[in-house]
Image: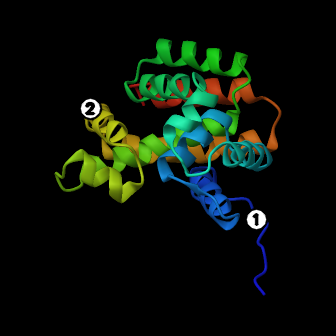
Amino acid sequence: MSVEKHAAPAPWDTAKWLAQRVRSQGHKISPEAAQALVDAIGTDLRELAAAADQLSQEHDGVIDVRSVGARYHGLESKVYEFVDAVLDRDQQQALKRLRSLTEHGENAIGIVAALARQFRIVAAVKDGPKLPAEVIARELGARPGQVKRAFRQARNFDAADIRRAFRLMTDGDLALKSEDQDDLILDLLVEEITSRSR
């Protein structure tokens, strides 16, 4: 008899946790759809489980990105617009898009997780082998579009910038879980990452 583990996954592993949960209940979801659902809902496991259960009831086959988008349209694209602005180091646009997300109730930890995922792709393409976007996407469990954007975004950061960004995101994630100042923490995180002077 297997023992169910209740330890919460790291924010960047939430999509993998969700896909495993859906499969354990006899349903199927593509990795891209699991990621899209996390991007749309955030990293609250209870909310994700409820959303996945609802989608499973509505779809007999594999839950795909289109299924997620049909029910949760809009939120995911807004998160990606924010992430792109941060990685373009466009501080004004990033803060504007961040405020739009938080005003619409987007989960703060989910925002940081989405940012961390794209930074992982940027780190992978920065000094990695020059492979087609589709190949890298399969290896990273990402979408080709995310990898193509990462090729462009990688020009905005050197290796030290990327290491610093990961430290800032880790600190931000911990602060969000222990303090009640989400807006301030997110603002400072965006300002630090997008700043070009150190």
**Pointer 1: what residue?**
7
Q: Is residue 165 above or below residue 75?
A: below
Q: Indicate which disc residue 65 carries.
A: none
Quadrant location of residue 10? bottom right
**Residue at position x 51%, y 44% from top?**
64
Question: Could you classify mark 1 by the number of other residues whose Cα lies within 10 Å: few (under 14), some (14-19), or many (20 or more)?
Answer: few
Q: Does residue 178 appear left or right of residue 139 in this picture?
A: right
Q: Quadrant of the N terminus?
A: bottom right
Of 7 and 50, the residue lying toward us: 50
Residue type at mark 1: give it: Ala
Spot occupied by residue 28 in the image (x, y as percentages of width and height): 58, 57
Q: Residue furthest bottom?
A: 1
Are the residues at dot 2 and dot 1 in contact (C-beta closer than 8 Å)? no
Residue type at mark 2: give it: Arg
- CA distance for labels 2 and 1: 36 Å
How has the structure been colored for display?
Answer: rainbow
Q: Indicate which disc residue 152 carries.
A: 2
Q: Earlier in the sequence, mark 2 or mark 1?
A: 1
Question: Could you classify mark 2 by the number of other residues whose Cα lies within 10 Å: few (under 14), some (14-19), or many (20 or more)?
Answer: some
Spot occupied by residue 7 in the image (x, y as percentages of width and height): 76, 65
